[in-house]
Image: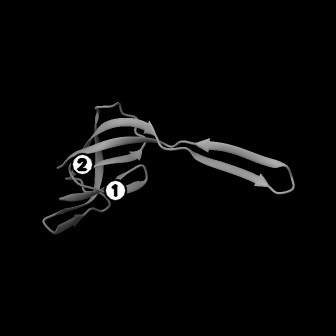
Amino acid sequence: MFAIIQTGGKQYRVEVGDCLEVEKLDKNVGDKVEFDVLLTSTDGAVVAGTPVLESVKCVAEVLEQGKSDKVVVYKYKPKKNYRRKYGHRQPYTKVKILEIK
């Protein structure tokens, strides 16, 4: 059984037991969070929502809050002595899918 969930403006294909990094959620470590399910499949039978399935929820547990690797952004203009260097670390929340009900 798998489901397509939506969070943070992105869609993920998940199964029970999967761990994934999603956009930062305002939850503490150990909290439970529910995601909207857009599509689910059990034994080859696919059920799609319009846009979400009201009867199906995906429950996950927050494992950690973190930041991804640094992305260095460097801008310059040739012959003008213009140089700017800065970095960005995107925050994320790591979750583990507990059940799809």
Q: Report which residue position mark 2 lands on.
A: 58
Q: Is residue 25 above or below residue 28?
A: below
For this rendering, which residue is in front, 10 or 80? Answer: 80
Where is the N terminus found, in terms of image quarters?
Answer: bottom left
Amino acid of disc 2: Cys
Relative to 75, 5 lies left or right? left
Q: Residue at x 33, y 31 (%)?
A: 29
Q: Report which residue position mark 1 lands on.
A: 12
Count of all numbered marks drawn on residues in the image: 2
Mark 2 element type = strand
- Give the quarter of the image for residue 62: top left
* N-terminal-most mark, 1 or 2: 1
Q: Residue at x 55, y 44 (%)?
A: 70
Neighbourhood count class around disc 1 (C-alpha, 10 Å): few under 14, some 14–19, many 20 upward? some
Furthest toward the left, the residue is: 43
Please state the horizontal and vertical placement of residue 27, each as a whole percent of the image.
36, 33
Amino acid of disc 1: Tyr
Neighbourhood count class around disc 2 (C-alpha, 10 Å): few under 14, some 14–19, many 20 upward? many
Relative to 59, 70 lies left or right? right
For this rendering, which residue is in front, 65 or 71? Answer: 71
- Give the quarter of the image for residue 64: top left
Q: Is residue 2 above or below residue 34?
A: below
Of tags 1 and 2, which is closer to the observer?
1
For this rendering, which residue is in front, 21 or 47? Answer: 21
